[in-house]
Amino acid sequence: MAINIIHCEFQHKARWGVVEGTSIALLPGEFSTTAEFIKAYPLDKIKSNRAEETVPQGQVKLLSPVTSNQQFLCQGANYRQHMIESGVNPDQKSFNMFFTKAGSCITSANSAVEKPTRVKFLDYEVELGLVLRQDILKPVKVNSANLHDYVAALVIVNDYSARDIQIPQMQFYKGKSFRTFGPVGPYLCMLEPSDMPLLRTLNLKLTVNGQLRQSDNTANLVFGPEVTLTEWSGVHDLHCGDLIATGTPAGCALAVPSPAKQRIAALIPESLKWKVFMKVQAKRSQYLKEGDVVRASISSSCGRIDLGEQHNVIVTPTAH
């Protein structure tokens, strides 16, 4: 059975522990990276290891279970309805969209998200994150039988995005990598082989100020973890502890023009096209504003996997 791990600060030290209700059973050892922890604590060792002490969750400061020195890899347009919403036919799309976010944008699940003053259109994207078990330094063929050899754990990711930078500038990395734009956790859900089929049965949910914005199930992923890992391995090196965010469901704030309108837009000058884009997006009340509260959760209906809940408040950065 899957076990939820928390990464936290306790008595001025970064620690790792097992979630036990409202308490945390702190494990022996200090590990500065996600990779170090995964290598030191396979699931059977976690189950057999005696905790050093058990403390209430309220006595610790939550940290991201994926440390900022790990790679932050992403998939785009990977849910059927999100593709349709974006003007793409999921039955005709033949390629997996890959991009990256900066590790420096990673933050804890309950942190404030800083909306830079120059960002007008801040968007949300709840995603299932895969955390790797081992280094992958050559092309591999991943399938349902060996997926557990490569995926150690699951996390919640929120891929916050500055759409007015990402889209007009064609800058995925820049528009998605501002500091605090990558909350991860709260839990690192360590998996057993028998848990792997549940990866395609998970319910994703995101609300803004209590209003449901995103709701879908990983059964609707177009490119599943096996295909994705196989393709990533043929592109570049992957490492233990690295994070792969697998795409977001429909319901984002971004309004994508219909295919017909996109064809028309391709015929007009660039400067005019992006003026129209900005005017259309400015009418979208769904974009995040200062004070908004975003909550995100991922779990299986059977209850075997529950990744907890993220809670982010949108704030304006303080001047330094």
Image: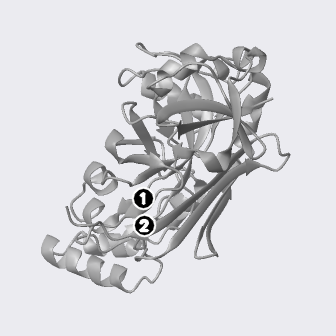
Q: How many marks?
A: 2
- Residue 247 appears in the rendering: yes
Q: Residue drawn 64% across and 50% down?
A: 58
Work out whether 283 lies above or below 199: below
Place of residue 275 in the rendered image (x, y in percent of width and height, measured from the top left): 21, 80
Residue in front for this viewpoint, 57 or 194? 57
Badge 2 crowding class, 10 Å Cα cut-off, few under 14, some 14 to 19, many 20 or more, is: many
Question: On the image, which quarter does residue 225 sit in?
Answer: top right
| Amino acid type at mark 2 | Asp
Q: Identify the secondary structure beneath mark 2.
A: strand
Answer whether labels 1 and 2 touch (C-beta < 8 Å).
yes
Question: On the image, which quarter does residue 151 sit in?
Answer: top right
Residue in front for this viewpoint, 75 or 319? 319
Residue in front for this viewpoint, 308 or 59? 59
Report which residue position mark 2 lands on: 123
Report which residue position mark 1 lands on: 160
Query: What distance separates the C-alpha of mark 1 from that of mark 2?
Result: 6 Å
Badge 1 crowding class, 10 Å Cα cut-off, few under 14, some 14 to 19, many 20 or more, is: many
Q: Residue drawn 39% across and 55% down?
A: 181
Place of residue 255 in the rendered image (x, y in percent of width and height, measured from the top left): 43, 74
| Amino acid type at mark 1 | Tyr
Q: Residue drawn 68% across and 50% down?
A: 308
Quarter in which the C terminus is drawn: bottom left
Question: On the image, which quarter does residue 159 sit in?
Answer: bottom left
- Residue 141 appears in the rendering: no
Work out whether 51 lies above or below 20: above
Image position of 69 (left or right of 217): left
Q: Identify the secondary structure beneath mark 1.
A: loop
> Considering only order in the chain, which callout, 2 or 1, is on the residue closer to the N terminus?
2
